[in-house]
Image: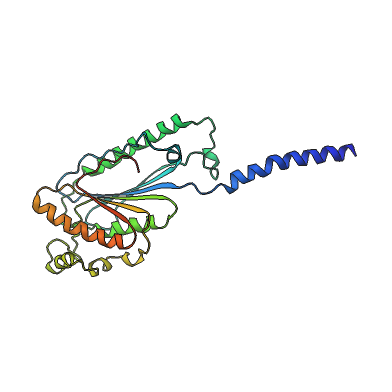
Amino acid sequence: MKHAIIIFIIVLVLTAIGVPTYLILCRTPHRPIYRASYLIDRTDTFGLEPISIVTENSFSWDKLKEGRNIRIRKVSDVVNEDVSILTLETYRDWSNPSTWNFEDNELFRENRIRKFEEELTTTLNAIAIQRTGYGHTAVMEPLIQELLYLQQYPMDDRELFVYSDLGQNTPQDNWISHSVNHKGLEIDSPHLWTGIDGAYDLTDLSGIHVHLIHRPRNAEDDAEYRLRANYAKNRLTELGAEVYIHGAINHSGY
């Protein structure tokens, strides 16, 4: 009888400890990840402003806990350029035992993020100064491919930064000097958009913030860029994205 009571007490204690632990480790809701894609157009002959990534001090602790997944993609005269990926694990992600470091604190996490942002800033600017001088630019296909990637993660915080004049100029599709395409931009024809590979697979961009960034060299360049940027904005807004057109941008987190 005595042994039965002892066993009963042990089972009771283990249950009291095990059930809450299971609920914490296995039933914790999904914590969003910050996902961002950067497109850096190396065919533009006019240089980019230096890119700086700095998280604002006013961000909530919950935001600082989020993991980061950053994709950096070069734009050139070919569609399938290299993609670099930088990641920062979610703070104490219960599904990932490697992050269960209970000595971490808010200050430690902020320092981790600062170092991550320094690495990101260095990587972006190293690409931005690599001007290729190519006569052709394939920018719309990579733009759509990155949106297709972001579209897969509706629960996460998502942004796309496009550093380009959006001067799509390939043997198959010329938005700069081809008179028919130029007229299509002016009348806001959706046919230019649907002719780009992958465009039909974009179905819901709700929650995605798209930043179109270009520093015009003169008024004529600005007018041409605005025509292309507003066309892209209209197409993406129709799919639910929030689109912003910038001459330059100072990143202050998300």
Quarter of the figure that contains the N terminus: top right
Classify residue 219 as left or right of residue 232: left
Q: Position of residue 65 (x, y in %)?
A: 46, 39
Between residue 57 and residue 87, name the one nearer to us: 57
Q: Position of residue 136 (x, y in %)?
A: 17, 57
Q: Position of residue 193 (x, y in %)?
A: 25, 66
Classify residue 43 as left or right of residue 106: left
Residue for point 44% across, 42% down:
66
Quick check: 89 above or below 151? above
State the count of labels.
0
Quick check: 105 above or below 120? above
Q: Position of residue 15 (x, y in %)?
A: 72, 43
* Quarter where residue 86 is shown: top left
* Quarter where residue 59 is shown: top left
Q: Indicate the colouring scheme.
A: rainbow
Between residue 46 and residue 109, name the one nearer to us: 109
Quarter of the figure that contains the C terminus: top left
Quick check: 134 above or below 49? below
Quick check: 63 above or below 141? above
Between residue 247 and residue 120, name the one nearer to us: 247
Residue for point 21% across, 58% down:
230
Residue for point 43% across, 55% down:
154
